[in-house]
Image (cartoon, helix red, strand yellow):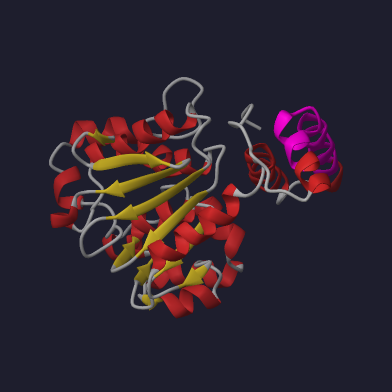
Amino acid sequence: MTDTFRDRLTLDIADHIATVTLTRAEKYNGLDLEMLQALVDCAKKLRKNRQVRVVILKGDGKAFCAGLDFGRVTKTPMKMLLAFTRFGIKKTNLFQQACWAWRQLPMPVIAVTHGYCYGGGLQLALAADFRIATPDCEFSVMEIKWGLIPDMTGTVTLRELLPLDVAKELTMTGRRFDAREAERLHLVTRVSETPEQAARELAGSLLERSPDAISAAKALFHDTWNAPEEQAFLRESRLQFKLLRSRNQRTAMNANFKKEAPRFGPRQRDY
């Protein structure tokens, strides 16, 4: 069964893997307000589904995502202004949440990139846990071309992967670079001629492990990567205590003792 969100993306779930496809191919999957909201809505739906254990995020057509569709977004200035606004206690606006929602998912997300991965499209890919790109995929922190700066959570995701001077250089020049350089810079996890196949192989490896442990590992590193040691150690202990009380941890342990493949149940909680 395929779910469609605002005619901008589709969601297919099979064998515990969710495949999310940006479907605005005629515009190189450019991000308009409808696409941004569709990304948020789809992520919300996935977050509630504890049967889903891996997400693959990809683009239809000739590109993963060429960034923000300025021509369309600027036609509705009031809606654009509202999309920039944070409401209540939210820490993100719509532009930011369209990317951050994928970072917040309790299961790993694998972005499959090809063609172009520019601006907001790059920030969306960086919100994933892993990125697998075709060799000819072209990347750019392109906001400077429009006299702007990255504002869709790239300030957090870029600093986790790049030295400060490299982040500045890419942001201030907006230069384009290929997947091999992206891999050397650690912006891409892997380069492959068949990136979706590689993503599914990685997903298969993740499915062999406890979905609770995978979710806890994601939470652990995101919560502690730049945290003080004391805070990191406390987070380690609390997550481990929760895992020791989970059915899937017992399943993993018993399967190892019996030297057989584990048969895990759904993820028990969000970590």
Is residue 254 part of the magenta span, yes or no? Answer: no
Work out whether residue 110 or residue 77 is closer to the camera in this orientation and state it: 110
The count of marks equals: 0
Counting from the top left corner in percent of width and height, residue 224 is at 73, 46
The x and y percentages for residue 264 are: 63, 37
Residue 245, percent from left and from top:
79, 27
Q: Quadrant of residue 67?
A: bottom left
| Residue 254 x, y percent position in the rendering | 79, 39
Location of the C terminus by quadrant is: top right
Residue lying at 31% horizontally and 34% vertically, measured from the top left: 83
Q: Residue furthest top?
A: 88
Magenta segment's dominant SS is: helix
Q: Quadrant of the N terminus?
A: top left
Residue at left 42%, top 37%? 97
Answer with left or right where residue 203 lies relative to residue 35. right
The magenta segment is 231-252
Q: Residue at x 39, y 62 (%)?
A: 196
Q: Is residue 248 left or right of residue 122?
A: right
